[in-house]
Amino acid sequence: MNDLQVTLFEAPESEKKKKTDISEWGTFKDSLKAPVHRWFTYPAGFSYKAVEHTLDRFNITAGQRIYDPFMGSGTTNIVAKSNGINSFGIEAHPFVIEITKTKLFWEIENKSIISTLDKIEKSLSAWKKKTPENLKEYLGEEFPELILKCFLEDTLYELLGIRNQIRKIENDHIRRFLKTALICTLRDVSIAATGWPYIAPNKIKITSMSKKGFDTFKTTCLKMAGDLSKIRSEASNLDSEHDIVLGDSRKTNFPDESANLIFTSPPYLNNFDYADRTRLEMYFMGDAKNWKDISKRVRTKLMTSATTQISRTDPRYSFKSEFVEKCPEVFNFLNTAVTELGILRNQKGGKKSYDLLVTGYFNDIYDILKDNYRILKPNSKALYILGDSAPYGVHIPTDELIGQIGICVGFKKYSIELLRTRGGKWKENPQRHNVALRETVVILEK
């Protein structure tokens, strides 16, 4: 691959004075403290500050449009709305996009939330009086075993009562708001270690033993209502439009040359199973009962980013002929890496299909960048926050490769700007590779 000049993703002067750590702009850390952004701790998120800086840096103003092809929980779109900028986005995860829709609707009044909470609380009193004698058996008929392990029985029964009452609410916006609040309550009241992104049902979280289901849910609702009031008051312009689509970013129906900027963070090539990361929430809400449901409803919809998605007999995990033809240098590099990974996997205990993961990932990235090029206006930019990887110690410089693929699909040039180095905390682990990794911003120019 070509050598590249790696520069710093400069923070604006106002941010420098605050001593902002731009190394966290590829993480969700900043967003955990920001109104509305913090509602749902999506483990694949990035900092809203990175979006704010980019809008300012490239002079994206009210009336223009920004596109996010990996919308996730809506960070890009929320920032756009706060600044009166139109946005559109696509997300393949059907559970996560419902969270995004909630986070982008700011017109709910506090009195409506409070009155609905009062009704739920009254109904819940009657529900609790009907607690079955054999509660464990009753809950076992409603929930998968994972859920039973993560909550005290009385708490889970109370949460079930709240869920059932929310389902009866006719107003779509109120129902979605309260559903999101309930989802955000689950890991807070769980007695299992359920920090993102993993669930450890055999590890007890003592701090949750005394938490009550409805009390925590109500606190969450009121906090979210306060966030809406705050973000509305701080928004520079509330007159904007936002088109949110459930679908596949590899091939979209958005109009040609309709975006003034693309800002996103694609899945990293690090074997992160996005379908599994919302398993607790989907099981509780009744959106899935088992691994098969998770795979059918989520995993098969996502671009390739985890070995759990891969069947070694599936022909789509061979390099696409169009990709090979249009990007011969990238293909030659990747083909060598894939061949090496195919040998290494047979020498490892897990025999993970990293070879096919790399193939499927870049097949998908090629299609996505081609579609992104079509959507972007001339003389505009597309920014991608991402990290490189080294499966089985074979370095895949994802940022450089995406830059080169961008050129292949029509972008006139690209640059890479460094956010942070990665992997240092694992250097003493003998099971890990010793390849120096980084997180960067790839900027493609049309």
Image (cartoon, rainbow, N blue to C red):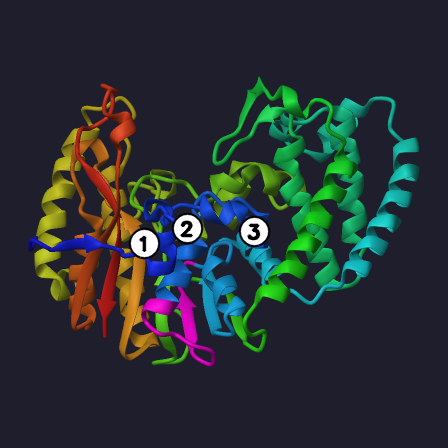
Measure the C-alpha gap from mark 1 to mark 3.
23 Å
Using the image as rendered, state which of residue 324 and residue 117 is in the foreground: 117
Amino acid type at image mark 1:
Ile
- Residue 327, percent from left and from top: 13, 62
Q: What residue sits right under mark 2 in the picture?
A: 46
Q: What residue sits right under mark 3 in the picture?
A: 95
Q: Which residues are magenta?
A: 56-70
Residue 322 lies in the magenta-colored region? no
Q: Residue at x 38, y 38 (%)?
A: 308
Q: What residue sits right under mark 1 in the picture?
A: 385
Amino acid type at image mark 2:
Phe
- The disc label shown at residue 310, or none: none
Q: Mark 2 against mark 3, which lies toward the viewer?
A: 2
Using the image as rendered, state which of residue 147 and residue 72 is in the foreground: 72
* Label 1–label 2 contact, CB within 8 A: yes
- Residue 288, percent from left and from top: 60, 42
